[in-house]
Amino acid sequence: MKIFTPQDSALLLIDHQVGTMQLIKNIPLDQVKRNAIALAKTATILGIPVVMTSSQEQNLQGALMPELAAILPDIYEKRIQRAGIVNAWHDPNFKQAVKKTNRKHLIMAGVTTDVCLIYPSISAVQEGYAVQAVMDASGSPYELSEEMSRRRMEREGVVLTATNTLIAELAQDWSRPEGSQLLQILFQEVLPKIQ
């Protein structure tokens, strides 16, 4: 397995829209939100480029989570607003934004897993990118569709991961200056409160 580092990775947040998020039923919605926020904060701390995209914001899907706009206002303003293309990788503006990062390791999270994450993650692998899909910052309406999507992504070479695992991989060493900030994110956003 290729180790992802802040120097070779980009974060792609796909369709974390307030309407679409309501479709998530296989994992607590609050957990998905907290993990997406944790990924955005981690990217900010480590200087990892971020690409955000949304689909048909004017419809039921709605706008991207306002928390993402607060954390990454410039990226939010430059988000790729797709007209309806299901596979974000097939949107030339999205693909170009990813290429501009000059990173070959892609960290992806998307809502929903079974529609918005599965296709671009597989497409990117097929074009030579290493992809980790953050499963607890994504979700599906049904356990079955989530499970089938996981199997298909893994068969195609997408590495499935969780937010805390990915943050630890990027940190590599908690004693680094950024390490304490990342630990704070883990304990505030990702890990359950320790009683």
Image (cartoon, helix red, strand yellow):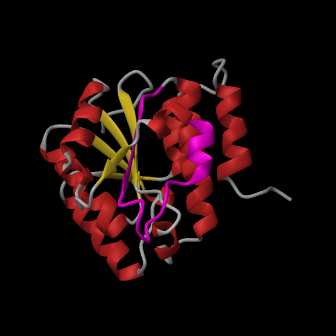
Quadrant in the rendering for residue 93: top left
Q: Residue lying farthest top?
A: 177
The N terminus is located in which quarter? top left
Q: Is residue 129 above or below residue 116?
A: above
Residue 146 at x, y percent in the picture: 37, 73
Q: What stretch is highlighted in magenta?
A: 48-72
Identity of the residue drawn at 28% across and 60% down: 118
The C terminus is located in which quarter? bottom right
Q: Residue lying farthest left?
A: 127
Identity of the residue drawn at 55% across and 54% down: 65
Q: In this view, does 54 lie above or below 105?
A: below
Q: How many labels does the image show?
A: 0
Q: Is residue 57 magenta?
A: yes
The answer to whether 133 appears left or right of 167 in the picture is left
Quadrant in the rendering for residue 129: top left
Q: Does the magenta stretch include residue 62?
A: yes
Residue 120 at x, y percent in the picture: 24, 52
The answer to whether 180 appears left or right of 31 in the picture is right
Identity of the residue drawn at 45% across and 68% down: 20
Q: Residue lying farthest right?
A: 195
Residue 27 at x, y percent in the picture: 53, 71
Identity of the residue drawn at 34% across and 74% down: 147
Which one is nearer the viewer's eye here, 121 or 170?
A: 121
Q: In this view, does 113 lie above or below 103?
A: below
